[in-house]
Every structure is written in C-alpha cells, then in structure tokens.
Image (cartoon, rainbow, N blue to C red):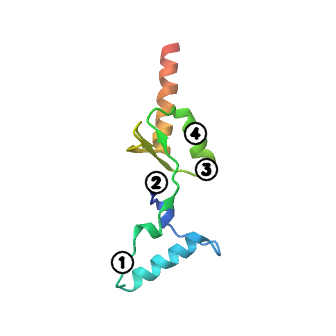
C-alpha cells in the first residue's frame, strides 16, 4: 500500500465536519503548544494512493488530473518502486511538446 502527504493534506479546508478540517485543527493545536509526543506523518497522509507505471501513455493521465483532482501522481517502475512524480505542469508540457512535434512533421 502506498501513502502520500500532499499540500491538500496540510491545507485548511473550512467545510464544516470535514475530515481535513479536523486534521487542520489538530495541526493548529500542535503548533500552539509543545507536546510530549510529536505528531507523525501517518496522521495526515493520503492512503491508497493512485500510481502510474513509467510506461503509461501521457494521454491516459489527462482524466486522472481532470476528473479526480490529482495535482501530482507517483510514477513507479516495472518492479513497483518509486521512479518519480508527474505533475499537472509536466502533463501540459508533454502534451504541448507532442503537439508541436506533430505540427513540425506535417509542415
């Protein structure tokens, strides 16, 4: 199982009753006063993280970013080890480069 801490896990979400709102209040309490037990990442991280393989086509990432709210996705190699992260910016850049390369070939 993979776990990931993202900016969204740490950002304040002010919806009443939200799990993230509860986590943010816990962070604020921890920051205000010293605790004998330091907080751990496991209390904030996202579990059941979606990953892609290094061989995944760029176009297959579009729905993951567009419909599921991902801003970055871990990329794993064939042995299921972390190879890196791909971001929305990486995706846009890759799609642009593919599009530009196609235009150059047709000209």
User: Closer to the N terminus: mark 1 or mark 2?
Assistant: 2
Instruction: Tell me if residue 102 comes above or below residue 63 in the rendering.
Output: above
Q: Nearer the viewer, mark 2 or mark 4?
A: 2
Residue 59 spot, x, y in % from top left: 56, 33
The numbered disc on residue 62 is 4
Residue 16 spot, x, y in % from top left: 65, 75
For the residues marked 1 and 2, what is the alpha-carbon distance in whole angstroms? Answer: 23 Å
User: Closer to the N terminus: mark 1 or mark 3?
Assistant: 1
> Mark 2: which secondary structure?
loop
User: Closer to the N terminus: mark 2 or mark 4?
Assistant: 2
Q: Nearer the viewer, residue 41 or 68?
A: 41
For the residues marked 3 and 2, what is the alpha-carbon distance in whole angstroms? Answer: 17 Å
Q: Nearer the viewer, mark 3 or mark 2?
A: 2
Q: Is residue 96 visible?
A: yes
Q: Nearer the viewer, residue 103 or 83?
A: 83
Please give the residue where the numbered disc 3 appears in the rendered image: 68
> Mark 3: which secondary structure?
helix
Q: Nearer the viewer, mark 1 or mark 3?
A: 1
Please give the residue where the numbered disc 2 appears in the rendered image: 2
> Mark 1: which secondary structure?
loop
User: Closer to the N terminus: mark 4 or mark 1?
Assistant: 1
Q: Report if the CB atoms under discs 4 and 1 are less than 8 Å apart.
A: no
> Mark 4: which secondary structure?
helix
Q: Nearer the viewer, mark 1 or mark 2?
A: 2
For the residues marked 2 and 4, what is the alpha-carbon distance in whole angstroms? Answer: 21 Å
């Amino acid at each position: 199982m993979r776990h990931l801490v993202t900016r969204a896990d740490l950002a304040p979400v002010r919806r009443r009753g939200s799990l993230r709102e509860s986590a943010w209040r816990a962070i604020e309490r921890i920051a205000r006063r010293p605790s004998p037990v330091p907080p751990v990442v496991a209390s904030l991280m996202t579990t059941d993280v979606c990953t892609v393989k290094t061989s995944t086509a760029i176009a297959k990432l579009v729905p993951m970013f567009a419909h599921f709210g991902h801003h970055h996705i871990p990329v794993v190699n064939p042995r299921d080890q972390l190879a890196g992260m791909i971001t929305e910016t990486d995706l846009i850049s890759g799609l642009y480069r593919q599009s530009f390369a196609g235009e150059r070939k047709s000209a």
